[in-house]
Amino acid sequence: TDRYQVVGNPIAQSKSPWIHAAFAAQTGEAIHYDRHRPEPEGFAAHAAVFFEQGRGMNVTAPYKLDAYAFAHQLTERARLAGAVNTLKKLPDGSLLGDNTDGYGLVSDITDNLGWPVAGQSLLILGAGGAVRGVLGPLLEAAPASLTIANRTLSKAEDLAQLFAHKGRIDCLPFEALNCPYDLVINATSAGLNGEMPALPDGFIGEQTRVYDMTYGAEPTPFLRWAEGQGARIRADGLGMLVGQAAEAFFVWRGVRPDVRPVLSALRAELK
Ligand code: ATR
């Protein structure tokens, strides 16, 4: 059976083995998919051994830059993202580095949730690796405007420059946010530590659709805050997780799984 694996640290809580087992059952593709936590600094050594047999790897924090460096070739979207979350062994034995995170986000927002992006005013909170990973596909979805707000403004400005050839990005410090946006995406890592960014009132309205790239059994701190700001339409990032996995499955197997039943089952599993 073809072997696949997700690699990260921590890895015990990863849903990826569950998701890919569900895709395999649904599509009839026979795969073996497990999880691994390498020794600190040990990504490359582990990957070299794994790919003696293995066909593909998902890579999560903190190894996406290691995977980028380890790949022999990169897709355009991985190069733009500056990170690799999917490695695929090609017929000649070389390793292709890809990034399916942005695809996962945009497909969740537009296909699963049915929220428009084209022609909408879009605000992203955060300017770290998670944001860089999704900016390409978001700009390709043709929002009317795209603004990045970050605690450290210079990091937002660096991203705007990096993506200038794909579209205009405005940058603001959190304090300067003062008018409601159509779509607000939280991509800060604050929630992972149970923290909330220090955000002002006034940039979320009743009509604003609010998305948090993190997820959990309970609403995230950011989504609870947004609810308090009056946002009625809210979603967490579980669908992004399943969407990036589905795209990786497609990259490896050439077969597109149906995301929705797997997402519903995973949501039930989280509770
Ligand atoms: P990731 O891969 O999750 O993007 P990262 O590259 O370390 O991780 O980026 C973390 C992002 O979350 C940054 O935008 C960071 O803001 P700074 O650039 O100002 O550091 C943001 N972030 C993390 N904790 C935060 C907090 N408590 N308040 C506001 N922003 C926070």
Image: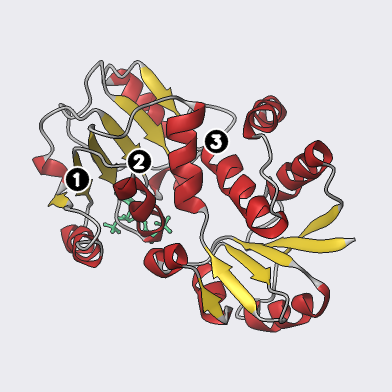
**Front tag of 1 and 2:** 1
Question: Callout 1 environment at 10 Å: few (<14), some (14 to 19), or many (20+)?
Answer: many
* Image coordinates for residue 128, horizontal then vertical, percent: 34, 59
The residue at the point 71 percent across, 43 percent down is 19
| Real-space Cα separation, disc 1 to disc 2, in angstroms | 12 Å
Q: Quadrant of the N terminus?
A: bottom right
- Dot 3 falls on a residue whose secondary structure is helix
* Image coordinates for residue 239, horizontal then vertical, percent: 55, 35
- Residue 205, by quadrant, is top left
Q: Earlier in the sequence, mark 3 or mark 2?
A: 2
**Front tag of 3 and 2:** 3
- Tell whether 128 sits left or right of 249: left
In the picture, the disc for residue 147 is: 1
View quadrant of ligand 1: bottom left
**Residue bearing mark 2:** 186
The three-letter amino acid code for the residue at tag 1 is Thr
The residue at the point 41 percent across, 32 percent down is 221
